[in-house]
Structure formats: C-alpha cells, structure tokens
C-alpha cells in the first residue's frame, strides 16, 4: 500500500487539480451545447506544439507558448464568429475547426520524426510522469483562471443560460471565457491527454444534470463523481498495470451508465 501511495500520489493530485476546474467548465459547456470545444482547442493546441517542434526543435517553453498562442487565436475566432452571427451553429463551427486542425496536425506529424510520439502523448497523456513542477504550474494557472471564473460567474452563467437563444454582443465576454478555457485545456492536455480531459469536462456534468438543475449542486455532484472515478481508476491501473487515463475514463463511463439507469428508474417510478 505504501508503494501505491508513493507512485500514485502525484498523479492523484494532478487529477484533483484538473477536475476541480474542468468540472465547473463542463457545466457551462453542457449548458451552451458546445460539447466538442475541448477536443477542438486541444487539437489546435497540438498544432501549435507541432509547429514548435518542427521550427524550434525541442524547446518546451516555446512549445507551451505556441500551443497557448494558437488556442488564444481560436478563442478570438470563436468569439468573433458568434458575435457576427453567420447563421451557423457554434457546434458546427467548432466541429469544422477541429477537422481543419486535425488535418493540419496529421500533416505536421508526417513531417516530424517525433510526431507520432507527440500524437500518442496528446491523446493518452503522461499523468503518471507528472512532476512537482507540473503540479505547481497547474495550481498557479488554474487558481488564476478560477479567480476570473468566480469574478465573472454571474455574467458567464447568464450567457450560458441563454447561449442558443441570443447572439452575443459582447465580444470580450466570450473572448475571456474561451481564453480561460484555452489556458486550462492547454495545461490539462499536457498532463492528462485529450481523452481524460474531455471525460473530466463532460461526463461528471452529464451525471449531475440527470439529477439537479442548480449549478452549485451540479458542481458538488461532479466533483464527487470525478473523485470516485479518479481513486478507483488509479487503483485499477496500479493493480492491473493499465494506463491511468483510460482507466479513469472507463470508471467515469461506468458511473454515467449507472446514473443513467438510476435516473431512468426514478422517472418511471414518478410517472
């Protein structure tokens, strides 16, 4: 048991740091019905990192800066498109953006000797090898983003509540939301990979939405679901020598199935 804690303490701390803020963001994403914004931004971030790899070789600082810079450009683009109202849904625009970014990433991967390794790292992550530096950086950046989310919580909630019914006239409100999103996604994907980040973002929010409508109750349920899935996923990974990210995603999926069946049964009982 001591070996388990010594190996999994840092990955568990990384999971907690990620899901504390991703769960909150996921509630807004679900309300806005822009489910694939995470994957799109992660893919765009990967393009920035691959460009850095080709041009600047192996410079982690430049790679992180370019990855975030590409995400900021995407944030500005999404905010501009929503403000101008081109008659196309945001989900469609996000999907097309993802497809273009994925094509660009595949092209860059084919030109890089380390491209395939980077692609695997992007999807599966390397949370087992997270360091104290990663945790410190995550704590600082996530705390700063959380502070902005708290300060502008009323404005963000108002926008999320009527996202599809109205066209944004406040470019900077949308840009701030997407920029904070980009910062969290860029760092989270670097540690946990796209699959785990997407699962933390969406699955707990969906589970909570099956039972509660208020954002505070949804957030508490989301945190509880993520905590249970993280602990059981890490234990499963340790006992059966399985990848951490997919293990946690599998348990999140299992919780979603159980919650869906429970909600369905409760609905039938009430009717």
Image: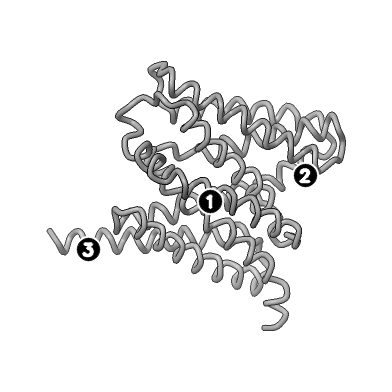
Where in the figure is residue 80, as x and y percent of width and height? 50, 22
Q: Earlier in the sequence, mark 2 or mark 3?
A: 2
- Residue furthest bottom as drawn: 1
* Nearest to viewer (mark 2 / mark 1): 1
Residue at left offset 58%, top offset 28%: 74
Q: Are marks 2 and 3 in contact (CB under 8 Å)?
A: no
Residue in front for this viewpoint, 259 or 214: 214
Q: Earlier in the sequence, mark 3 or mark 1?
A: 1
Image quadrant in which you'd find residue 11:
bottom right
Read off the residue under disc 3. 266
Give the label on residue 146, or none: 1
Read off the residue under disc 2. 117
- Residue furthest right as drawn: 57
Where in the figure is residue 115, as x and y percent of width and height? 78, 37
Q: What is the quadrant of the C terminus in the image?
A: bottom left
Residue at left offset 65%, top offset 54%: 140
Give the label on residue 234, or none: none
Q: Earlier in the sequence, mark 2 or mark 1?
A: 2
Residue at left offset 49%, top offset 47%: 149
Direction from residue 236 to residue 150 in the image, left or right: left
The local secondary structure at tag 3 comes to: helix
* Nearest to viewer (mark 3 / mark 1): 1
């Amino acid at each position: 048991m001591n070996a388990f804690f010594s190996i999994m303490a840092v990955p568990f701390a990384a999971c907690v740091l990620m899901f504390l803020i991703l769960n909150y963001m996921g509630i807004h994403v679900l309300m806005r019905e822009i489910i694939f914004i995470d994957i799109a931004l992660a893919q765009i971030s990967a393009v920035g990192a691959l460009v850095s790899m080709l041009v600047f070789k192996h410079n982690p600082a430049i790679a992180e800066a370019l990855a975030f810079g590409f995400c900021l450009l995407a944030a500005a683009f999404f905010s501009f498109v929503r403000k101008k109202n081109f008659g196309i849904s945001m989900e469609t625009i996000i999907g097309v953006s993802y497809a273009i970014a994925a094509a660009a990433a595949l092209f860059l991967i084919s030109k890089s000797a380390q491209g395939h390794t980077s692609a695997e790292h992007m999807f599966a992550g390397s949370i087992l090898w997270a360091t104290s530096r990663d945790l410190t950086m995550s704590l600082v950046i996530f705390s700063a983003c959380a502070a902005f989310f708290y300060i502008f919580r009323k404005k963000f909630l108002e926008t999320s509540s009527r996202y599809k019914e109205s066209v944004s006239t406040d470019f900077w409100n949308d840009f701030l939301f997407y920029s904070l999103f980009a910062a969290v996604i860029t760092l989270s994907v670097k540690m946990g990979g796209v699959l785990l980040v997407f699962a933390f973002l969406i699955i707990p929010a969906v589970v909570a939405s099956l039972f509660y409508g208020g954002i505070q109750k949804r957030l508490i349920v989301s945190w509880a679901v993520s905590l249970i899935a993280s602990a059981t996923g890490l234990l499963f990974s340790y006992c059966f020598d399985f990848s951490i990210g997919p293990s946690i995603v599998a348990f999140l999926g299992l919780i979603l199935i159980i919650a869906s069946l429970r909600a369905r049964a409760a609905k039938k009982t009430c009717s």
